[in-house]
Amino acid sequence: MHDSLGRALWQVFARLRPIQLTLKLRLMVPGEVALRARSEQRRRDTFGRRLVRSRRRMLIALPVACAVAAAVGLSAVPAAQAACSTEYGVFWKMSTGTYGLAYGARNEIELKQHSIDSSCTSASYPVAETSHLRLGGVDGNWVEAGYEEDGSATPRYLAFAEWGLNYTTKSFNTRSYACLTAPSYERWEPVNAAGTYNWNTWLDCEDGAGWRLLFQYTSTGYARGIPMGEGSRYGDNSGITAVHQNLQWQDATNTWNYASGVSCYSDNDPTYSGSGVTASRFDIVTASGSC
Amino acid sequence: MLRQNTRLIACVGAFLAVAALVVGFAVGGTTTKLAPQPVAGELPGPPVNIDRPFVDGVAIDVGNAGPTVGFSAVLPRHSGNLIAGYVHASGTSREDQAIGLVYDNGTSRFDVIEDKTKMTQADLASLAGCDHSTGCVGDWTLVRLQDGTQALEISGPQTNGLIWLHGEHRFDVFGPAASFSVDAAVSASNDVENAIT
């Protein structure tokens, strides 16, 4: 019984061999140890004493292969996770003077090609710039609209909007527009629908086509927020430099007012920081330090 | 017999080696492909700061918050130690004011935010449900507090918490998901609700 079970296992092992041969380099090394041990056994199958020795070698080699394969395979995990999953963000808020919370935030943002960390795949969008509000002035509640940039060699840009409560995203939507090409400037706007807790998000490509409605969010529970501009990135070597200008906020009469000042709200980015340029403009530049 | 055992051991070893290779490939390879990437629909929210519930927060003696916000803070009795209390900056209208309390229950810090709102129960209920294909993150579900009040439970990768209405007041209790479990959020929320009634 043992013998037949062993033979069956060998057959399974033999059938898996082609799979092993297709494994990537980091798995080939332990794989070869096992395969070499097996071929050595075959070569010496007719030489009794050496057969035992080769089997002993195999018995040593296989656990080694096993351990090395597991170690190599598992060691790849933290390296992969650590790279493009690291997020940094720079948030600058607008001053509304004595008005308090605003009904909308408008921000003209530079769209450009940024450096993208090599760990971020072409399917990811590691860089984002937004016009942003913290709903109710609560740190964990927000609505925003802006663009995100992907990790491909010739970058693609998507318009997106998002909102959430308690630091948890309720909706996130994207849409592509031909007008989103670098270099350019676009205006982005999340704005409250008067008399409701609903928010509309808009894009103006400044191409003469006017404002394009992006996405609508209903029943957020908030009609006002603290207006901000944001640059966020994933990956240590991704970049977020951009101009955020003509920052405006909307009051209860649906009037847009230029920010009377800008100031850093939060900055956990070790490489980039905001720099106030005028009362309604800040630039995200290469600079260490936080707020 | 020795030969049979040797072959069996060798085969089992071989099988384990293959299994290890497959597992190593599956875990390492899959994680490489699926490592958290900022793909469309998976961007997280703002960075969590439980110690700062408000963007424009001003520390306040909670017992004296009434004149500023127009109502007295509800203080949970059994949820831990009150670390700090905040209101929005001066100049904020009464309509927009709120009280933010930071508690420490020994395991985690968490926030209790109270404000006046015109949000309706229907508004709150409409937020239940989470379609991950539209970028929603975590679980947004309706639950009931001990006294029967319906609450919106939000459990995400960053926080766990409950939002509910009591009259014209809205309560929001949440803490970091890593240290403040859904059960802890429910317990603290019941404590807050019981302190009202």
Image (spheres, rainbow, N blue to C red):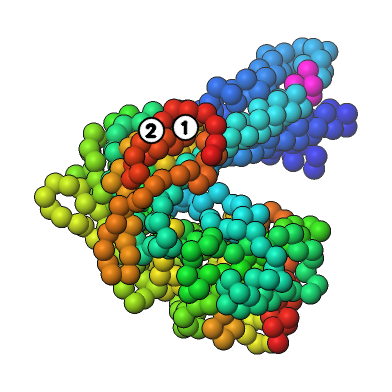
* Residue A223 on image: x %, y %: 40, 70
Q: Secondary structure at mark 2?
A: loop
* Residue A36 on image: x %, y %: 66, 17
Main SS of the magenta part reads: helix
Q: Quadrant of the C terminus of chain A?
A: top right
Quadrant in the rendering for residue B107: bottom right
Is residue A60 something one can see in this rendering?
A: yes
Q: Which residues are magenta?
A: A57-61
Residue linked to disc 2: A241
Is residue A159 something one can see in this rendering?
A: no
Quadrant in the rendering for residue A104: bottom left
Q: Is residue A173 above or below residue A10?
A: below
* Residue A69 on image: x %, y %: 67, 28
Give amino acid for label 1. Answer: Tyr
Give amino acid for label 2. Answer: Thr
Residue linked to disc 1: A272
**Residue in view at x 44 percent, y 70 percent:** A222
* Residue A6 on image: x %, y %: 74, 36
Judged left or right of residue A109, residue A166 is right
Q: Is residue A263 above or below residue A36?
A: below
Label 1 crowd (10 A; few <14 / some 14-19 / many >=20): many
Judged left or right of residue A44, residue B150 is left
Query: As rendered, which of A92 and B179 lies closer to the eye?
Result: A92
Q: Are marks 2 and 1 on the same chain?
A: yes
**Residue in view at x 63 percent, y 75 percent:** B66
